[in-house]
Amino acid sequence: MFETESEVLAWYERQPRALTREFIDSIPWREVPDHALNPAFIPVLFYMRDVEYFTDIYHKEMLRTPTGKDPVILKFMDRWSVEELQHAELLNRFLAEADLPTGEKWQDEARAKIPWRYTIENYFMDWFTRPFGRHFHGVHMVWGAINEITTLQGYRRLADLAGHPILKTLLTAIMQEESIHSNFYWSIARLKLNQAKFSRDLARFIVGKFWTPVGQGAKPEHETNYVMAALFRGSSGLDHFRRTVSNRIEGLPGFDGFQAITERVAPILQAP
Ligand SMILES: [Fe+2]
Ligand SMILES: [Fe+2]
């Protein structure tokens, strides 16, 4: 366990990239079409690609908030946002190699579909968080931890369920980076929440009331629900989510017995 936020940052900066140029060049991209890809997971790949890409928008939003001005978080986000964008590019490359329709302008197309409501809500969210100052850092970090852990576990399920060996190779490397991101957010969240009871109460309240699965808002709810159900369907999927995502969040200060995120996804995963 880390004692200070600077230690967490130093740890993060010591982690080597999994997606090095040599690794990317070693992927047998040309063999991608030789393997079958379960069509149920094609929309999942497009969704993941776009949500990875939207990190760029989220990063810019965060820089405007007090959390984004925190020196440790600011430094982390410089590298983190580059890694997430690369995940988007690599998923796009996989889709293109699999002969699935990805145009030159896929970023513009994905961005154009973001509803106005999402942009406006984010603008007001910034104003809403300001009075809470540093107490809101914990909310952002818990939120980030849940999203990173969900993404990591989502990729794990996708790698297993899609049954495509080259996709699995790519996702395994992406997962290593998501695991590092998860650990960063979780560790900073723990330290921020330990600072004050008010931060813990605020984080538990806000996350419990407003959390939705990663990507929802920028993407329509029915797409998010499709992705969550494709990856974590049924009681075994729900159990996986509870064990790997929810239990990890319950280990944060002030989150003992916190069931809200499992309760939020349960009806989606158990729908017939
Ligand atoms: Fe990512
Ligand atoms: Fe990540």
Image (spheres, grey):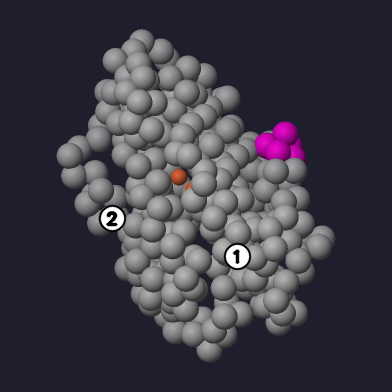
Mark 1 element type: helix
Quadrant of residue 186 within the rendered picture: bottom right
Q: Residue at x 75, y 79 (%)?
A: 197
Residue 196: where, in percent of width, then height?
72, 79
Residue 205 visible from this viewpoint? no
Instruction: Give the position of the C terminus as an image quadrant.
Output: top right
Q: Does residue 236 show up magenta in the picture?
A: yes
Instruction: Examine the rendered structure and indicate whether residue 35 appears above or below residue 130.
Output: above
User: For the stretch drawn in magenta, what is the main secondary structure?
Assistant: helix
**In the rendered structure, does residue 82 fall within the stretch colored magenta?**
no
**Please, what is the three-letter code of the amino acid marked with disc 2?**
Arg
Segment tinted magenta in the rendering:
235-240
Q: Residue at x 40, y 47 (%)?
A: 84
Q: Position of residue 190 (x, y in %)?
A: 69, 64
**Residue at 48% in and 39% down:** 16
Q: Name the N-terminal-most of marks 2 and 1.
A: 1
| Residue 102 occupies quadrant | top left
C-alpha distance separating marks 2 and 1: 33 Å
Residue beneath the point at 29% across and 23% down? 97
Residue 111: which disc?
2
Q: Nearer the viewer, residue 220 or 252?
A: 252
Q: Is residue 81 above or below residue 103?
A: below
Q: Which residue is mark 1?
A: 5
